[in-house]
Image: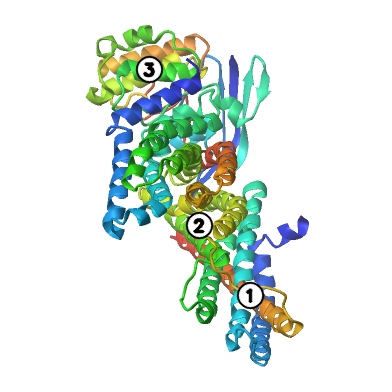
Amino acid sequence: MSAFTALLSRDLRLAARSGGGAALALGFFALVATLVPLGIGADLNLLSRVAGGVLWVAALLAALLSLDRLFQGDFEDGSLDVIALSPLPLESVSLAKILAHWLSTGLPLTVLSPLLALLFNLPASATLVLFVSLLIGTPAVSAVGAIGASLTLSLRRGGLILPLIVLPLLTPAVIFGAGSVAAKMDGMAPSGGLALLAAFAVAACLLSPFAAAGAVRLNLTN
Amino acid sequence: MNILYRYANPREFMRLSGALLPFTAAAAVLAILAGLVMGFSVPPDYQQGMTVTIMFIHVPAAIVAEGTYALIAVLSLFSLVWRHPLSDVAARAAAPLGALFTALGLVTGSLWGRPMWGTYWVWDARLTSFLLLLFLYLGYMALWNAIEDEIRAARACAILALIGAVNLPIIVYSVEWWNTLHQGESIISGKLAPVFLWPLLVMMAGYGLLFLTLWMIRIRTEILNRRSRTLMLGGA
Amino acid sequence: MITSLTAEKLTCVRGERTLFAGLSFHVAAGQALALEGANGAGKTSLLRLIAGFLAPRAGRLVLKTTQGQSDDNEERGRLIGWLGHQDGLKPQLTVMEQLIFFAALYGSAAGCDAALEEVGLARQKDFPCRYLSAGQKRRLALARLMISKRDLWLLDEPFAALDRDGQALMARQMTRHCGQGGLIIAATHEPLGLANASLQL
């Protein structure tokens, strides 16, 4: 087992054993998707038009829930010191954690989304676009979120600041992702938005391990 | 590089800023007053009437707001790469000013649009990007306040500012893309007649000087604060 | 293989306080150094400095190995086995899972069973770490240290939370480590039980 795989599988195991892993995020996702129609009315026409945006925002918020613990747990119990001294560079450590977060949060959210799209009367073709957009976009959420998580890992109340820092940085993902669904609904090709989303996601995943590693190093001076 | 390091010394900075402050303050007040007078003496725009004068308050605020973020990004680079000692203080001092100018830009932009749109807010691409810029500032300030250790707070915020600076063009682009997708309203833009240009430039100079004045005051205050803290801890 | 670690006039500043200045020491292979001093004197900071987490305000650390010498933080970090204040254990993982994770992270997953035997946790290998006592957790952390096969051991209060048998175990392992040519730098309130030099902070 390589060091990277060891860290990845440990984090996945921890996610599964702490409060049911993806269950919390999925529950939140479903709850928000339920609350919105309660808030804006059950007009299926209206709901299908707002579905892309609402579900994207809900998925984004659900993915954020577990982000603040990404590095904080290891920081608080001293594991981070031991991990930092291992042969695995901190950049790889960050990448492993981003991947673990996506597998345990972003991916399950993506899989649930078609079911929630039903609640919003979203047509099948648009649902497919939603699914693909979440599949491409949730890794970006984990990646950018990891930067916020590493910057705030030493904060007790970091959980409140994390969304404030991370959400503005993720607006392109929401715009391109939900925009693709809206384009499809308007009869246009969603490929433009999806391509932009993919570019954003690739850039985020490439850059953020370095930024996160830098922030972790900064916090290790504690 | 040497010239920068000369003024990295707090004492040098205090000396220089002390000498400059009265001039920049006076110049700022004069420029803004002149700009306002020039602005109000401009003939009413046939489309927007007198409300176009809001532009003279809005546009410079917007430019200073965006410029300040770029400034903070550059200072952050200095802080992280070259460990320039005053850049932390300078960046921290600049942030609330940037936020204030952004808020000013939002309010004046909204007031400017009211006569045209009939509402106080439309999701115009520029205003929306501005709103996001305000959040970037708030996040930056919140992070700084949350981290107790000064040096770590400065470094963490430097990382955040650089990430924000890289992301900002992407955010602006995505908002424009979004705007074309949903066919939103936009603040009428176009060629500016020369009669508009001069008051605008004067106001921009005035705002820039105002920013510089307030910024220097804030940096000086921070340096004095640190001195008194060191005295307090050392003398105790 | 490390031959020696030399500190030259280290100065450490945390926040606005200077913890120590002009500190120098030398530890050769097979030797141990005990860091002594009151709480807050900077023992943990010095350990973190050696580990490369902190940068000194002045001075440097020179590491000599059979391959050459270096004062680079990252390179030094790859040769360090760390036993900090905290044990670095997750309550939800079992003893064996925890050890295998660290072993794989540090290069090889072999030898976990033997290590658990050595520290007396073989019977508990499938217990989740939340059911271990403080002393047992410390033993597990020791097993992790042994299995990492690092030359320079940095220990922060190695005997804390251990009962008499645990302390004897720790002393045995430390003696063995030095006997095999390893180096130990330990912050401690108690005598290490080895022939060692002392540094007062």
Q: Which colouring convention does the figure follow?
A: rainbow
User: Residue at position x 55%, y 60% from top?
Assistant: B179
Q: Are marks 2 and 1 in contact (CB under 8 Å)?
A: no
**SS for tag 1?**
helix
Residue A177, position as x, y percentages in the image: 50, 46
Q: Chain of mark 3?
A: C
3D distance between C-alphas at marks 1 and 3: 61 Å
The amino acid type, in three-letter code, at marker 2 is: Tyr
Earlier sequence position, callout 2 versus callout 1:
1
**SS for tag 3?**
helix
Residue behind mark 3: C99
Foreground residue among A214 and A49: A49
- Quick check: A202 above or below C154? below
- Quick check: B136 above or below A26? below
**SS for tag 2?**
helix
The amino acid type, in three-letter code, at marker 3 is: Leu
User: In which image quadrant can residue C174 be found?
Assistant: top left
Q: Are marks 2 and 1 on the same chain?
A: yes
Q: Is residue C93 left or right of residue A152?
A: left
The amino acid type, in three-letter code, at marker 1 is: Pro
Which label lies toward us, 2 or 1?
A: 1
Q: Is residue C191 left or right of residue B172?
A: left
The numbered dot on residue B140 is 2
Residue B71, position as x, y percentages in the image: 64, 61
- Quick check: A43 above or below C120? below
Estimate how packed mark 1 is, as few (under 14), some (14 to 19) or many (20 or more) residues with alpha carbons within 10 Å: many
Residue B10, position as x, y percentages in the image: 63, 63
Q: Are marks 1 and 3 in contact (CB under 8 Å)?
A: no
Q: Chain of mark 2?
A: B
Residue behind mark 1: B60
3D distance between C-alphas at marks 2 and 3: 40 Å
Which label lies toward us, 2 or 3?
A: 2
